Image (cartoon, rainbow, N blue to C red):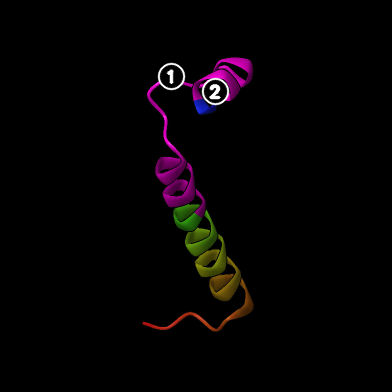
Amino acid sequence: MMAHWCKLAGLPKSLTLHDLRKSLGVYLAEAESLYQAADGRAQT
């Protein structure tokens, strides 16, 4: 089923749910860092 969804989305067939979950985690962590930096709450 995952391979079918990947094909429909134009993503690599070898993509797994773990890969998507990891990518989302990285994206959210980076977004939070950018928000904190813009808000002046970045920790050095």
Identity, as a three-letter code, of the amino acid under mark 2: Cys
Compared to residue 2, the image places residue 8 above or below, namely above
Image x and y of residue 40, in percent: 57, 81
In this view of the protein, which residue sits in the foreground, 27 or 5? 5
Residue 25 position within the rendered picture, expressed as x and y whole percent measured from the top left: 47, 57
Q: Amino acid at mark 1?
A: Lys
Q: Residues within 10 Å of mark 2 (few under 14, many from 20)?
A: some
Residue in view at x 56 percent, y 60 percent = 31
- Quarter occupied by the N terminus: top right
- Residue on which disc 1 sits: 13
Q: Residue at x 62, y 21 (%)?
A: 9
Q: Please identify the dominant SS of the magenta region.
A: helix
**Contact between labelled residues 2 and 1, with CB atoms less than 8 Å apart:** yes
Pick whichever of labels 1 and 2 is earlier in the sequence: 2
Specify few, some or many for label 1: CA neighbours under 10 Å numbering under 14, 14-19, or 20 or more: few
Q: Which mark is residue 6?
A: 2
Q: Which residues are magenta?
A: 3-24
